[in-house]
Image (spheres, coloured by chain):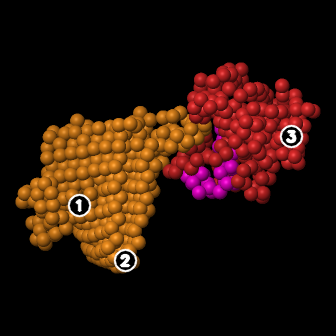
Amino acid sequence: MTDAQERSLERVGYDTSGGMNRSASFLIEDESAKEATSKEQDLVMASMREARQKYPWVKELEFSLVKRDKDEFTRLVASHEDAAGNFIHVARGAKIAFPAQSCFLLKTQRYEQILHNIIVLEPGSQLHLITGCTTASYRTAGRHVAITEIFVREKAQLTYTMVHDWAPEVEVFPRSTITVAPGGSYISNYVALTKVKHIETDPVAIVNAGATARFNSIIYAKKGSHLDIGGRLLLRGEGARGEILSRVVAEGSRVISRGYIEGASATTKGHMECNGILLDEAASIYAIPELEAIDPDTELSHEAAVGKIAGEQLNYLMARGLSLDTARSLIIRGFLDVKIEGLPLSLQKVIDTMIEQATKKEAI
Amino acid sequence: MVEVEGKRLLDGIDMEICEGEIHVVFGPNGSGKSSLINTIMGLPPYCVTHGEIRFRGESILDLPIYERAKLGVSLAFQQPPAVNGVSLSALFKTMGIEGERIEKLAKDLNMGGHLNRDINAGFSGGEMKRGEMLQLLAQEPELILLDEPESGVDVDSIQLLTQITRRLFQKEIPIRERTTGGIIVTHTGSVLKHLHANRGYVMINGRLMCSGAPLDIFTQIRRHGFGACIQEFEQGGNDHD
């Protein structure tokens, strides 16, 4: 692996040096698994091709949450009999202390990376997973299409942090569904702060009785990017709870920020916050917060605010001696700096570093 | 002359503030007091159409807000905005001010617990004012502009605020050694008691109508209102013109 590739991996939180505490690692280049290791007996980190051989039940999980014919991209993945991808399994009751890491690297120019991932956390288990998606070079063009099906069993807890660091000529179409069994918890942190041609993702979490799910999205859409991002929470079991939080900064880019919460059972509770900042005339943010109350005993709420940086905030900071650019980047950094509850420090640092880089004066 | 969208807000203003001096501008709400110090700070939408603003002999009219601040002009806002996501600590770090000094200043101002909070978000009236003073102390300005420093502050906090204001204006050192001066805009005057300000003015409709000893003006305003005050000082003690 070249130094440049290593740097690409590091930017998305993937440690190649072995210096950081990682419980397991998985690296795929295009569709070829380069690393699949685990330091924990109760944690399986494998390629999907290997997993299908070793654990026949994995095939039964495939397309059990995401329908094959949902759209052209799911059909594309389904057309690949033995699609590459990442398989993660945490045994019943296993609480994995250190984060596991996986990385999807688009290496070959104009490659179409087609993946199918399965993640299973058995009852009572816990895992922090950080997944980085990146390219071998800034000049790489290509397409990433991935189905991810996640099974969080009873009282299991998964924190899933995904960092996208694609290149300007990459198109990205993830299709993910998560089922959270009673008493389980799923927290998704999605971070995309670099230029990309197109991302279209709208993961769905089915939240069962007494379970919780949360989608946090931190987006800095650079010039020329087109992002259609969101999250759907289906609160299907009694007492299920969920939250969607998105912070979007758009600079010469088009962002569609979706959020949907369905309250379909008694005493369910959901809340959504969609906030966006437009940095210039060429930027646009289309926020679509949707609430659907099906059960009369559900409590759903949302707040959305989209606009440019308030002039009074800029003037205030400039009155403290900060130049316009510095004041602006300080406000943007603060806007994106969502401290995520329960996130390990090492993962928070990855996000903080990315925000720092994205909001440097010269970057803005 | 100062205008906003073609409308005249201030006219005929003539003030000179020397080191060690505190000038106080009284006036009813909407008289133009805040417009005056906002204009000096360079805030929009105020536009100086005639006249000059000089700081240490040099015109600052063409300088943006932050250049004026760097030169040593600093404003404590009457209603400072909340800046969500940006803590006071992050602001001070960006301003390049050393952490230990800030911590000490914050402790003196009962703001130690606020350094890691977002600027002005959820602050009480008193906390906002102390936050403003903390920032000004950190900036070490030479021309201090205070916009209604006592508004929204409970009675118990006025004393602390007065102490901080004295510190800002270097009241504890001999006048010849002081390097700061400034303008306090107020319509209640309660912060003035221990400040020994040098000169007071009454502003009505964007004009300084009279001037004199600040506490005398303040007493007159409290007793008889702004109108009577102007009459009194125009007849007796107007040394402004």
Q: Horizontally, is A4 left or right of B185 in the view?
A: left
Coordinates of residue B223 in the picture (x, y in percent): 88, 48
Where does label 2 land, which residue? A296
Asked whether the beta carbons under mark 2 and mark 1 sit within 8 Å of each other, the answer is no
Mark nearest the camera among 2 and 1 is: 2
Tag 2, which secondary structure?
loop
Residue position marked by numbered label 1 in the rendering: A176
Mark 2–mark 1 Cα distance, whole angstroms, equals 29 Å
> Based on the displayed image, in which of its 4 quarters is residue A182 positioned?
bottom left
Q: Residue at x 28, y 44 (%)?
A: A226
Q: Which residue is mark 3?
A: B229
- Residue B5 visible in the displayed image: yes
Circle 3 packing at 10 Å, graded few (<14), some (14-19), many (20+), is many
Q: Quadrant of residue B66?
A: top right
Camera-nearest residue between A102 and B86: B86
Residue type at tag 3: Cys
Percent from the top left, x then y, of residue A275?
A: 42, 52
Label 2 or label 1, whichever comes before in sequence order: 1
Mark 2: which amino acid?
Answer: Pro
Q: Is residue A136 above or below residue A323?
A: below
Outermost residue, right direction? B236
What is the chain letter for disc 3? B
Chain B drawn colour? red
Boundaries of the magenta span: B113-139
Q: Which chain is orange?
A: A
Q: Amino acid at mark 1?
A: Ser
What count of labels does the image hold? Answer: 3
Q: Residue at x 24, y 64 (%)?
A: A177
User: Crowdedness of circle 1 by 10 Å Cα count: few (<14), some, many (20+)?
Assistant: many
Circle 2 chain: A
Q: CA distance from mark 1 to mark 3?
A: 73 Å
- Residue toward you, B216 or A194: B216
